[in-house]
Amino acid sequence: MDNVVDIVTALAAPIVEGHQFELVDVEFVREGKSWYLRLYIDKPGGITIDECALVSDELSEKLDSIDPDPIPQAYFLEVSSPGAERPLKKESDYQRALNHYVHVSLYQKVSGEKAFEGFLRAVDTDELALEVNLKGRIKTLTIPRKNVAKARLAIKF
């Protein structure tokens, strides 16, 4: 269903950017018997429910006007904030997350683990430097970007 994501991203980006918001992510997923088209939007200081409703209304109108329908099956449209544990997908997300607490899941183990939480201290096109607490010791791990399955902001308790 990547085609749906591509189509919706192309339609949603001008709407979202027209309101000076950021389009964080678009996903089209099946959960049980239902399909969900989810857009995550944000802006400095956070996004409001009214702003989510505004984008939802404008995108819904745009999708309804297209013939043939780019999404033939029934689905639920959800527009929301990415939340406090916002995913890191784009380069600008990683740059904004520098010196913040993050969670990183890996494809292959590093130091015997496939997931880490710590402070993102450096990032470039090839690797991340993550300051973590390993068994009571603070260490800086260098993680190849190609080994990062998912990364997101995290809340430190």
Image (tube, helix red, strand yellow):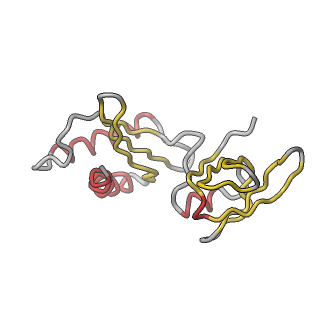
> Looking at the image, which residue is at 74% across and 51% down?
112
Direction from residue 146 to residue 70 in the image, left or right: left
Q: Position of residue 44 (x, y in %)?
A: 55, 50
Q: Position of residue 154 (x, y in %)?
A: 66, 43
Q: Quadrant of residue 55?
A: top left
> Looking at the image, which residue is at 21% across and 34% down?
74
Kindly give the residue lying farthest to the left in the view shown. 67
Using the image, determine if residue 46 lies above or below residue 10: above
Kindly give the residue lying farthest to the bottom in the view shown. 125
Q: Position of residue 73 (x, y in %)?
A: 20, 38
Kindly give the residue lying farthest to the top in the view shown. 33
Direction from residue 42 to residue 54 in the image, left or right: left
> Looking at the image, which residue is at 60% across and 48% down?
152
Using the image, determine if residue 32 lies above or below residue 103: above
Q: Quadrant of the C terminus?
A: top right
> Looking at the image, which residue is at 57% across and 64% down?
146
Using the image, determine if residue 36 lies above or below residue 119: above
In terms of depth relative to the viewer, which is nearer, 130 or 80?
130
